Amino acid sequence: MHGTLSRSLRVSAVRKDAAALNVVESVGGRRVYKFRASDGDFDRYSDRLSVKGWRLDGYNANGVVLFNHDDGADSSGAEPQLPIGKGRVYVEGDALMVDVEFDDEDDFAQRVEKKVARGILNAVSVRYLMLPGQYRQNERGGYDCDAQELLEVSVVTIPGNARAVRAKSFEDAEEDIVERIAARVVELLDARAAAKSTDEEEPEPEAADEPAPDTEAPPAESPKADEEEDEAKGFIASDAAKSFVEAFRVYIRGVKQ
């Protein structure tokens, strides 16, 4: 194949969708949203794109972010939609990532950002060119591409990628993490209490009819000796669990700042 592959209504361009990875990060006081834009696995078009094959310099020189790929080319006389923000793309591990910053001075862009922040809009889509001589048909009827140039990134309403599911941000997951840790702490404390209760209920073995030794055996420790010792040291299990959970919550908040 020697030409440029066309896979959409956009001339010589392909559009693919992917999922938002994180809700928002604060960078120098700016709100930057991080998305996973593409990976090297099969998509719904049965195509596979080499993550290392992305050509990104052109996009990063003019990193416009659109809404639903509306660049005004099909406006049919209507006022074309202006970009809603700017993006920066880069490869991270096995994925193409994009950091999106919405336009604070555009009312429509702010409406889109609010829906992204609330989880109503979750996905982005990329438009790109498969470079001549760098793609071939694969066993699923799509194409495997070794090199492609990114043209544009859009926030979209309906994703076309089967993996277009937004992951929780660390902020969203905080309460869930704390609750799971708290539940585990309670389980461990209950198991400890049950083990002590079992030890207390076990009958002592009957003493054999043997002559008493010359020296007296040391007195057996009280079954509650461990608890009394803990309390003497100021350790109360329920209070310790609460303190642990609160300390971990504070730690999580410190990591995010």
Image (spheres, rainbow, N blue to C red):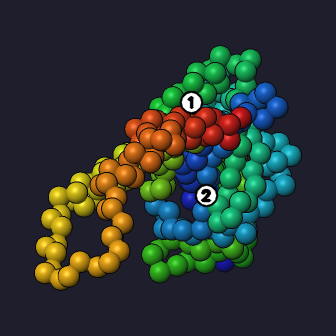
Q: Considering only vertical position in the picture, is 109 above or below 6? A: above
Residue 127 is situated, as x and y percent measured from the top left of the image, at 65, 51
Residue 139 is situated, as x and y percent measured from the top left of the image, at 47, 80
Please state if 184 lies on the left or on the right of 142 as rendered: left
Q: Considering only vertical position in the picture, is 189 above or below 7? A: above
Mark 1 lies on residue: 117
Q: Secondary structure at mark 2?
A: strand
Q: Residues within 10 Å of mark 1 (few under 14, many from 20)?
A: some
Residue 225 is situated, as x and y percent measured from the top left of the image, at 37, 52
Residue at image location 47% in from the left, 41% down from the top: 232
Residue at image location 66% in from the left, 32% down from the top: 72
- Residue 230 visible (yes or no): yes
Q: What's the residue type where badge 1 is placed?
A: Ala
| Residue toward you, 228 or 157 | 228
Looking at the image, is mark 2 or mark 1 nearer the viewer? 1
Please state if 95 lies on the left or on the right of 156 as rendered: right
Residue 135, picture quadrant: bottom right
The quadrant in which the N terminus is found is bottom right
Q: What's the residue type where badge 2 is placed?
A: Ser
Residue 110, picture quadrant: top right
Determine the residue located farthest toward the bottom in the rendered image. Answer: 210
Mark 2 lies on residue: 38
Residue 200 is situated, as x and y percent measured from the top left of the image, at 22, 57
| Residue toward you, 193 or 112 | 193
The quadrant in which the C terminus is found is top right
Please state if 153 lies on the left or on the right of 236 as rendered: right
Q: Residues within 10 Å of mark 2 (few under 14, many from 20)?
A: many
Residue at image location 38% in from the left, 47% down from the top: 227
